[in-house]
Image (cartoon, rainbow, N blue to C red):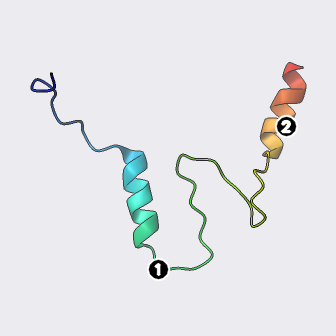
Amino acid sequence: MFEQVEDYPVDPIIIGADYFAADPRTGKLNLTVGIYQDEHGQTPVLKAVKLAEQRLV
């Protein structure tokens, strides 16, 4: 079934995750694709998202 599937080029998002993992600095933020949580495990809603929601509602 997958004999004809060719390799996919490297995804830039994955490269960003690799760079993040290799960076030894503390206090850095991983902004690759995912769900972001604060130190309390809460998912904050960005101010820009709140403003866009207000404009649409």
Q: Position of residue 54 (x, y in %)?
A: 90, 28
Residue under pointer 2: 50
Q: Position of residue 49 (x, y in %)?
A: 78, 37
Depicted 54 relative to depicted 14: above or below: above
Q: Quadrant of the N terminus?
A: top left
Q: Exactly how many numbered labels are in the figure?
A: 2
Please give the name of the residue rendered at 84% of the width and 28% of the height, measured from the top-left corner.
53
Callout 2 amino acid: Lys
Please give the name of the residue rendered at 34% of the width and 43% of the height, measured from the top-left corner.
11
Callout 1 amino acid: Pro
Depicted 46 relative to depicted 1: above or below: below
Q: In the visual, does 39 lie left or right of 23?
A: right
Q: Position of residue 29 (x, y in %)?
A: 61, 64
Q: Are marks 1 and 2 in contact (CB under 8 Å)?
A: no
Q: In the visual, does 7 lie left or right of 12?
A: left
Q: Position of residue 16 (x, y in %)?
A: 43, 55
Res 14 label: none
Q: In the visual, does 11 lie left or right of 3?
A: right
Please give the name of the residue rendered at 53% of the width and 46% of the height, measured from the top-left corner.
33
Q: Earlier in the sequence, mark 1 or mark 2?
A: 1
Res 24 label: 1
Q: Residues within 10 Å of mark 2 (few under 14, many from 20)?
A: few
